[in-house]
Amino acid sequence: MAVPSHHRGVSRRGFLQTTAGTALAATAMPSSLWAENGNVPKADPESTVGRLFNSLTAEQQKDICFNWNHQDPQRGLLRTFIANNWNITKPEINSDFYTPEQRALIREIFEGIIQSDWHARIDKQLKDDSGGFGNEQSIAIFGDPGTDQFEFVMTGRHMTLRCDGNSAPHVAFGGPIFYGHAADGFHEESDHPGNVFWPQAVAANRVAAMLSGKQQKQALLSTSPEESAVAFGGPTAERPGMPVSELSADQKVEMQNVLKTLVEPYRQADQDEVMSCLEAQGGIDACHLAFYRDDDIGDDGVWDNWRLEGPAFVWYFRGSPHVHVWVHVADDHRVTLNA
């Protein structure tokens, strides 16, 4: 079903298309928005996408730039495709396809999407999984950053990141995202040593440990769903696990901590958008929480696979054999994975 368009708050776009424009805007910026050296203003990632786009040659654009609704023969609507290990285009970030200046801009976009205190952690994930930032990773730009509809997508092993300036209606992050980590080989130990995302599962398992026997019967299920199953079920769908609305007050406080931990790696604007989308569908009380017995590494009762799901909210954490996390969040359940 098509989703009617509507306005959702103030746009993040506002990017500046020229160096002169950036310099002019910087004169009006408060000191808190200036970089540590005091000479260069901190640009929002959308602005940097515009600078990158303007730096591309015609030949480069042929390989990595697409129209907004570009259809791929195998993947469908390429802009919203998601997988646990894929490249959206062929040129790797660290290849000679890009100039050193362009590679620096791509890194700047990445750092703008991710909270600063998570840069080192994501860099560790990238080093463990692909040899470091820019190796085995690629990007694409959809639409024209000189208009009000564009999106930057970065992909690779254990990564699908997006930067859209609210171009994509209804969805958080600009569409479904993916993150993961194999910190200690393909099959990790039960405590997932060195895995930068495992603390998210630790937070969820704190809630599991607080559940009563009756609640455990609701929340603890035998078989994990297919890992890519992140389509929305809508408000009337039967969701796995127990309703968050039935948790006690102290359990709900811990559940809010889980949600905070999940969104923590991402810039504040994306965190706010996730919360806005969740509130539009009834808040966290409209979600169900499920833990899965299968694939329990070490048979220790610390559940490696778990899922938080609402009418238009899926955050599916799979910790076996290593961490894969699939995320799809919107303010309307009629949004599809190909929209």
Image (cartoon, grey):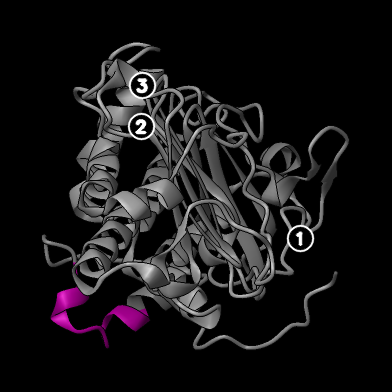
Residue 167 x %, y %? 62, 71
Tell me if label 1 and label 3 are in contact, CB under 8 Å: no
Q: Which residue is mark 3?
A: 182
Residue 304 badge: 2
Q: Give the mark count.
A: 3
Q: Which residue is mark 1?
A: 339
Going by the numbered disc 2, the residue's amino acid type is Asp
Going by the numbered disc 1, the residue's amino acid type is Ala
Residue 43 x %, y %? 35, 66
Tell me if label 2 and label 3 are in contact, CB under 8 Å: no
Is 292 on the left or on the right of 138, as rendered? left
Judging depth in this view, the residue of 230 and 121 nearest the camera is 230
Seen at 84% across and 32% down, the residue is 74
Vertical relation: 24 (above or below) 77:
below
Report the Cα–Cα distance between label 1 and label 3. 30 Å
| Residue 234 quadrant | bottom right
**Magenta residues (range):** 24-34
32 in magenta: yes
Report the Cα–Cα distance between label 2 and label 3. 14 Å
In the current view of this chain or complex, which residue is farthest to the right? 73
Is 287 on the left or on the right of 71, as rendered? left
89 in magenta: no
Q: Secondary structure at mark 1?
A: loop
> Who comes first in sequence, dot 2 or dot 3?
3
Judging depth in this view, the residue of 303 and 22 nearest the camera is 303
2 vs 3, front mark:
2
